[in-house]
Amino acid sequence: MSNTHEIRPGQSVELLKELHILTRDGKMNQDSRRKLKQVYHLFQFIEPLLQEVKAARGRVTLVDHGAGKSYLGFILYDLFFKALQDDSHIYGIETREELVKTSQALAARLGFPGMSFLNLSVADSITSPQLPPTVDVVTALHACNTATDDAIRFALAKRAQHIVLVPCCQAEVASVLRKHKGKLLAGNPLTEIWRHPLHTREFGSQVTNVLRCLQLEAHGYQVSVTELVGWEHSMKNELIIAQYKDLPRRRPAERLEEVLGRLGLEELRERFFTEPVAA
């Protein structure tokens, strides 16, 4: 069966073979089909943001955190950046050195000069001189635990115009909820929401993303939260898109403070900071 109808016009078949989405003879298995569908679905959300930046600034700088094998980065480059003929750039940040080297070699082989791959943690990337002082778009897909929050910190420090997050497993909020459960149970019937361990984990995950949205709003971003269709294999199918609009900050900052106080999460105040960030 031909797979060509599922591949977007202008997409390099050679790239899809290199990413092992297509076999050498151009076939696609079920797993690859799902992977490609996911990346294309995400591309639909990201492409208008890239077009907006290009129109406003004449070039686009995108940083992809926790890049892994850089499926997203390569497909974004192939479908959008490759045709720009300017100094637009994609930076892939990844802690596993072997993946960084593989991606560097692939970009060289495909002739994608506007791609760089850096062997850094998300936290270290904030101060690394290998990255520009400001960037336009920040993406972080399934950056585990606090890496999503580091990506938010990075985006705020770099004054990103757009932030695209697919949050991953997050244990920290749940562990703090667990720690203060006994103290809070007596005075507030709503703590029943996270009394059972499974609910603690799920509620912790939900609260983490609520706090992230409030934090972004407290920095002047307009935030939308939607579901990523086609990610059925993963429970973590939430997509958070934040666009800097210089919106009023006081109300979301107050709300964030109130939520932390009500849920006994004050010790996480530094993580969900609302004051401006120095780059």
Image (cartoon, rainbow, N blue to C red):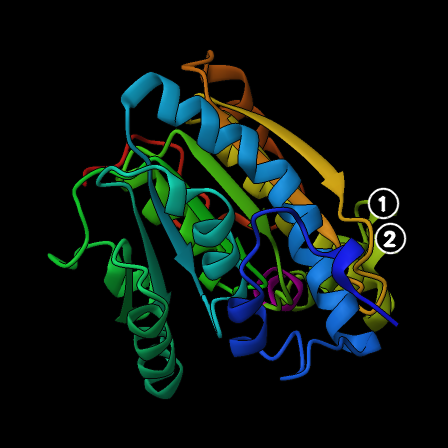
> Which residue occupies the foreground of this view, 220 or 238?
238
In terms of secondary structure, what is the magenta stretch mainly?
A: helix
- Marks 2 and 1: in contact by CB < 8 Å? yes
The quadrant of the picture occupied by the C terminus is top left
Q: What type is the residue that disc 2 sits on?
A: Ile
**Residue at screen point 83% across, 68% down:** 2
Residue on which the image places disc 1: 190
User: Which residue is situated farthest in the bottom direction here?
Assistant: 98
- Tell me if residue 109 comes above or below residue 78 in the rendering: below
Q: Which three-letter amino acid code belongs to the residue tagged 1?
A: Leu
Crowd tier of the residue under label 1, counting other residues whose Cα lies within 10 Å: few below 14, some 14–19, many 20 or above? few
Residue ID at (82%, 51%): 191
The mark tally for this picture is: 2
Answer with left or right where residue 31 lies relative to residue 82.
right
Q: Position of residue 134 (x, y in %)?
A: 22, 37
Q: Is disc 2 placed on a helix, strand or loop?
A: helix
In the rendered image of this protein, does residue 77 appear above or below residue 98? above
Residue at 35%, 65% (x, y): give it. 93
Q: Relative to residue 71, is residue 128 drawn left or right?
A: left
The CA distance from mark 1 to mark 2 is 6 Å
Residue placed most toward the observer, 229 or 176: 229
Q: Residues within 10 Å of mark 2 (few under 14, many from 20)?
A: few
Secondary structure found at label 1: helix
Above/below status of 36 relative to 9: below
Give the side of residue 176 with respect to residue 233, left or right.
Answer: left
Which residue lies under the disc numbered 2?
193
Q: Is residue 268 visible?
A: no
Please state which of the two labelled residues, at mark 1 or mark 2, is closer to the viewer: 2
Q: Is residue 73 magenta?
A: no
User: Where is residue 31, by image quadrant?
Assistant: bottom right
**What segment is highlighted magenta in the picture?**
172-176
